[in-house]
Image (cartoon, rainbow, N blue to C red):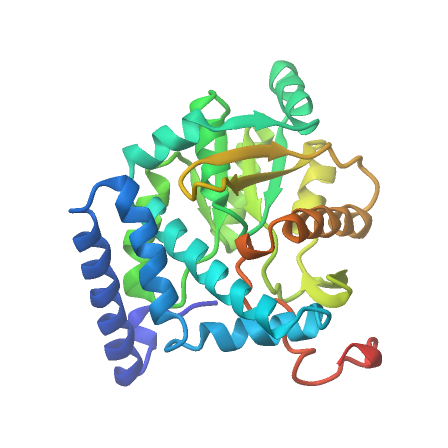
Amino acid sequence: MPKAPSELSLSARARYFAVNLALRGLIGGLKLIPYRWRVPAMGWILRRLAPLAGFYKRVRRNLAYTRPDLTSAEVEALCHQVADNVGRTLAELYAGKPFWERAKAAAISGPGLAALEQARAEGRPVVLVTGHFGNYDAARSKLVQMGFNMGSLYRRMANPYFNEHYVDAISATGRPMFEQGKRGMVEMVRHLKSGGNIAIVADMHAQGGEYLPFFGRPALTSTVPAELALKYKAAFIPVYGIRKANGLDFDVVLSAEIPPSDPITMTQAVCDDLERQIRSHMGQWFWVHRRWKPIQDVPHPDYPEAH
């Protein structure tokens, strides 16, 4: 659990505060640029800063672990694509109306759309699951603007100073927002019980989760989204905001509803569906995350061959 400023050491507070000031200054300065130039400009900046921050090293490490078949040229290209997408996503999350208009104009498709609309007609809750892929908030914004009663679960950032205005920015797309933790879970359950929809980004390393295959490697994965869907008889649907080739627009895709069975089977279906999307758009997933820790560092007893 990320710490509050008062729980951090003086040096950690100073470091986080300095990073926060730099990022806020960068984001604020970019707002002076028209949106169609601002978004690619932030992508360009992240491509220049990412090597200094160690992002490329982590991307290379994750790709070496999961896609050893890629050539060095392919890995290098993916490093740049990932940084560019992360930068664009960051600019979009703080853009407000111009981003919402792009999300509203996005084409929406996929077999899960009919299931989502049917659930709304029946007053049935929905658990939508996505990943740090494309711009996950484009899908949420699209659905909010289509009139769906969307709530979202988010994880507090490690940087407490940046977290505050980040939450303000993502909340502007639509409320309610539920912070990961006991209180947030209670509020989210209440929302589900009322027939609401929730969106959960389900591709992070999750303490207390289950080791499930993802890109052929065991990744600690939360089964909570599937457990919620089963407990509250909610439709369980993967959704994605896929960035189009022009870098500014999106396609929103809802995969087929995952049928109720058991939490592990349903969660594995989510991992498999996300993996299929990533393999089609490799540069759009946030390969900077430490998705496979700590197995990359120390072999797990259940997966000795994975190291």
Q: Is residue 205 left or right of residue 177?
A: right
Residue 265 image point, x, y percent: 82, 49
Residue beneath the point at 67% across and 79% down: 296
Residue 3 place in picture, x, y as percent? 39, 70
In the picture shown, does residue 272 fall above or below 232? Answer: below
Left/right of residue 187 with respect to residue 73 in the rendered view: left
Report whether 145 appears left or right of 233.
left
Q: Is residue 134 above or below residue 221?
A: above
**Residue nearest the observer in this picture, 307 or 282:** 282
**Where is residue 197, by image quadrant?**
top right
Q: What residue is at 65 percent from the left and 16 percent from the top?
A: 122
Where's residue 295, x and y in %? 70, 78
Closest to the observer, 220 or 65: 65
Is residue 143 shown left or right of residue 10?
Answer: right
Indicate the quadrant where residue 204 lies: bottom right
Residue 68 vertical position relative to residue 275 in the rendered view, above or below: below
Q: Nearer the viewer, residue 32 or 214?
A: 32
Question: Farthest residue in the top direction?
Answer: 121
Residue plotted at (38% across, 65% down) = 47
